[in-house]
Image (cartoon, rainbow, N blue to C red):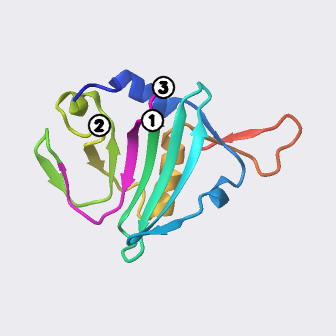
Amino acid sequence: MAILLTDVQIAALLQEPKRLKAGFRKSLRPRTKQGHTEADLHVTGDGGSTFYLRIRQSTTNPLDFSVILSHELPNTNRTVNLRRYNGKSHEHANKLEGTRFYDFHVHTATQRYQAEGKHEEGYAEPTDRYATSDEALECMLRECGFVEEETTAPAGGQIRLIL
């Protein structure tokens, strides 16, 4: 598998400011699919990068969810998952490291996994930073460069950085 993004490019994309309109959560309208709901939102970064925020939630298991940040590669219709915040519904195996765990976990795209022909976001680390899909979304917003407009912006258009 070809390397689509280097670790430096991945880090830059994660840090690129991604502005969200006040009340953006209302536009994350879940659609029912086979056994889960799914919502997505297109976001353009300040550097012109195209991102997609996706939330998948099982209709039967509240611990089975994914909150995903994808990036559309320029001049293609291909997306790369940069980060994926998963619930505690399955065991995860880091194939290159030979480690396994059953916990909430965060996948991050890596150059190494791409170079070895694995899924770009095949590497994951367990986390205790969230326990629900709503908390996983808030965690992603804090960690991946999202900026949300204030609901009642004073003159000058104040913007709140989500930390």
**Drawn side of residue 110 relative to residue 118, left or right:** right
Disc 1 crowd, CA 10 A, few/some/many (<14, 14-19, 20+): few
Query: Which type of secondary structure does the marked residue at label 3 adopt?
Result: loop
Look at mark 1 in the image and give the residue it sits on.
Answer: 77
Quick check: can you spot residue 163? no
Q: Nearer the viewer, residue 60 or 103?
A: 60
Look at mark 3 in the image and give the residue it sits on.
Answer: 75
Query: Which type of secondary structure does the marked residue at label 1 adopt?
Result: loop
Which quarter of the rendered picture does the N terminus lie within? Answer: top left
Q: Are marks 3 and 2 in contact (CB under 8 Å)?
A: no
Q: Are marks 1 and 2 in contact (CB under 8 Å)?
A: no
In the image, what residue type sits under mark 3?
Asn
In the image, what residue type sits under mark 2?
Glu
Q: Which residue is drawn at the image coordinates 24% and 63% (left, top)? A: 90
Residue 153 colored in magenta in the image: no
Q: CA distance from mark 1 to mark 2?
A: 16 Å
Disc 2 crowd, CA 10 A, few/some/many (<14, 14-19, 20+): many
Q: Earlier in the sequence, mark 1 or mark 2?
A: 1
Quick check: can you spot residue 61? yes
Q: Which residues are magenta?
A: 75-93
Look at mark 2 in the image and give the residue it sits on.
Answer: 120
Q: Which residue is drawn at the image coordinates 38% and 72% (left, top)? A: 35
Disc 3 crowd, CA 10 A, few/some/many (<14, 14-19, 20+): few
Q: Nearer the viewer, residue 48 or 130?
A: 48
